[in-house]
Amino acid sequence: MTPRTNFSFEVQYAAQSAAPQAERDSMMGSLGPSLQRLFAADDPSATVTVSDSHKGEGNKIIELTTTLQDPQVATTLQAFSKQHGVAVSALE
């Protein structure tokens, strides 16, 4: 059995984002299902939980549990970040 690892990330739009507010709200609203689909492609047992950050609107905390290794998680999150114009940073 492959061990499962928990990862925590913060996702946010940059303050100077060119994306319209409605687009940002829509993307943040569908963050959980979007990331779940991405990670499920390589790990069907992956789980993604989204919660609000203490930093306010437009900031979300992502909790990921997966059998994927760090490089695979990083590659997936980098692609997601570029596609949607968000910043993804690991939480300690």
Image: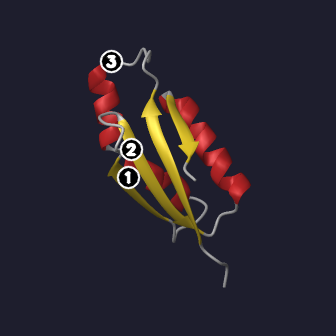
Number of residue marks:
3
- SS assignment at label 1: helix
Disc 1 packing (10 Å; few <14; some 14–19; many ≥20): few
Disc 2/disc 3 C-alpha distance (Å): 18 Å
Which label sits in the foreground, 2 or 3? 2
Q: Are marks 3 and 1 in contact (CB under 8 Å)?
A: no
Q: Are marks 1 and 2 in contact (CB under 8 Å)?
A: no
Tell me what residue is drawn at x 34 percent, y 52 percent.
Answer: 51
Report the disc number at residue 20. Answer: 3
Q: What's the residue type where badge 1 is placed?
A: Pro
- SS assignment at label 3: loop
- The residue that mark 1 highlights is 33
**Seen from this angle, which residue lies furthest right?**
71
| Image side of residue 37 versus residue 28, left or right | right
Q: What's the residue type where badge 3 is placed?
A: Pro
Percent position (x, y) of residue 44?
53, 68
Percent position (x, y) of residue 24?
34, 28
Q: Earlier in the sequence, mark 1 or mark 2?
A: 1
Q: Nearer the viewer, residue 62 or 39?
A: 62
Q: Earlier in the sequence, mark 3 or mark 1?
A: 3
Q: Earlier in the sequence, mark 2 or mark 3?
A: 3
